[in-house]
Image (spheres, grey):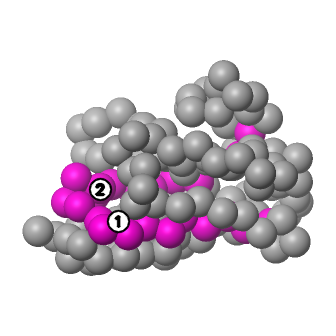
Amino acid sequence: VQLQASGGGLVQAGGSLRLSCAASGGTVRGYSMGWFRQAPGKEREFVAAIEWSGGSTYYADSVKGRFTMSRDNAKDTVYLQMKSLKPEDTAVYYCAAGRAILSTIRTVGAYTIWGQGTLVTVSS
């Protein structure tokens, strides 16, 4: 299975973007899906995750209330709707799939399949 992230770009502070992550070459059915981001000189950090059923979502405190993650299992695609963007949201955003459980769903190590990343730049 391969993941392809898209939707990144340049946006002004306060603006919105929607990222997409599509699976190909197989299915991510049964996998939890996550979004992580990595800013220059910083470690990759958790942003959001969703269980395979789509019933539960999890967010980093820094994005809670501004970002919404969803998934369309029929299309093997997940989305990250980002609103009220801030300059500190600037990073490369990665989608990932893994057999995560509740205690690991926010951790990089729980995910075994990673997309190539899409750059989000928020100008002030």
| Majority SS type along the magenta span | strand
Q: Which residue does the image show at 25% across and 45% down from the upper left?
A: 40
The kind of residue tagged 2 is Asp
- Where residue 87 sits in the image (x, y, percent)? 19, 60
Q: Is residue 110 above or below residue 86?
A: above
Q: Which residue is mark 2?
A: 89
Q: Secondary structure at mark 2?
A: helix
Of the pair 55 and 90, the residue shown nearer to us:
55
Q: Which residue does the image show at 77% across and 69% down from the upper left?
A: 72
Q: Earlier in the sequence, mark 2 or mark 1?
A: 2
Looking at this view, name the residue that lies furthest to the front.
65
Looking at this view, name the residue that lies furthest to the top.
103
Q: Residue 119 colored magenta? A: no
Identify the image quadrant of the N terminus: bottom right
Query: Is residue 15 something one can see in this rendering?
Result: yes
Q: Which residue does the image show at 70% across and 28% down from the upper left?
A: 102
Q: Secondary structure at mark 1?
A: strand
- Where residue 86 sits in the image (x, y, percent)? 23, 61
Q: Is residue 22 above or below residue 92?
A: below
Quarter occupied by residue 5: bottom right
Q: Which residue is mark 1?
A: 120
- Where residue 19 sits in the image (x, y, percent)? 52, 70
Q: Residue 88 colored magenta? A: yes
- Where residue 46 sits in the image (x, y, percent)? 48, 39
In the rendered view, does 21 fall on the left or right side of 47?
right
Q: Which residues are magenta?
A: 76-98
